[in-house]
Image: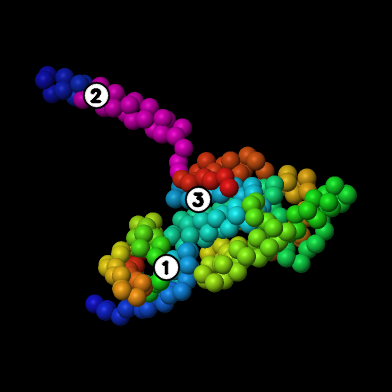
Amino acid sequence: MSTTITTVDARGQSCPGPLVSLARAFKEAPQGATFELLATDPGSKSDVPSWAELSGNELVSSEAFEDGSFRYVIRKAA
Amino acid sequence: MAITEDRVEQGATLADLLQRVEALEAERGKAIQKKNKMTIVAWGGNLDRIWPTTILATTAAASGMEASVFFTFWGLFAIVKPGVRITGDNWMQKMMSVMNPGSAQKAKLSHYQFLGAGPAMFKKLADDNNVAKPDELIALAQDLGVRLIPCQMTMDLLGLKREDLLEGLEDPIGAATAIREMREAAIPLFI
């Protein structure tokens, strides 16, 4: 089982920037590939789960930090 | 004898079931099959319409949905090449193009235009907040596979030619094809 996590740094980007960065990273990745998305867009709190639902990928975890940044772990489903 | 009767009975039931299946299939054939797709009719050419249009289209594509945008009326000016100035063959079409400078970069606001200061302020705010601008979003949309489709009738009406419009657009279509696009889209929007 691979435990490699690829980082997608979308800090500073606004809607729909983080999702587009994520989609780009996912496009070439194999099934099961895991990514962490770093973001500062407060809209990502609702948008990343929505994106995961729309695209059929798995949101493994989401964290909000005190500095106003967020970290999401998403696994590619298919 | 009983077995024969059973068979006859079964046969009758099967025929009945087949008939029902046939009727259901016919019914289903008439139903509209929706796709995981968003189609936007981009009617407005104002910055405050083209912006959400391009944000929604790119986000849909980034979410794995099919996405298409049908550009009609004022929306068509948003996909005019940035360098193209005056378009059209007669004075009316030319005047229309002067009033509506082409490309998403030159789009005006429906409110707070302030002789051009409004859009400039909006873009400054967009830069400060790292929000992609409509012309960048149109390029991004093309990159993500969003189908951008001009309206043939409006092109004729406004005297816009294929060479006046951005590269990489689909062939112009009419209202019926636009309706077909919308009919199969789970999310059809008019912006």
Of circles 3 and 2, the one toward us is 3
Per the image, the residue denoted by label 1 is A41
The residue type indicated by label 3 comes to Met
C-alpha gap between disc 3 and disc 2: 44 Å
- Given the image, what chain letter belongs to the residue carrying mark 3? B
Residue B182 percent location from the top left of the image = 54, 43
Q: Is residue A76 left or right of residue B35?
A: left
Q: Is residue B30 magenta?
A: yes
Task: Classify mark 3: helix, strand or loop.
Answer: strand
Marks 2 and 1 sit apart, C-alpha to C-alpha, by 62 Å
Alpha carbon of mark 3 to alpha carbon of mark 1: how far?
Answer: 24 Å
Please report the bounds of the magenta region as a residue range: B10-34
- The residue indicated by pointer 3 is B38
| Residue at (62% x, 65% y) in the render | B121
Residue at horizontal 80 percent and vertical 50 percent from the top: B96
Q: Which quarter shows the C terminus of chain A?
A: bottom left
Q: Amino acid at mark 2?
A: Thr
> Could you say which quadrant of the image residue B163 lies in?
bottom right
Which class describes the residues within 10 Å of circle 1: few (<14), some (14-19), or many (20+)? many
Q: Look at the numbered disc 2 and give the secondary structure of its residue.
A: helix
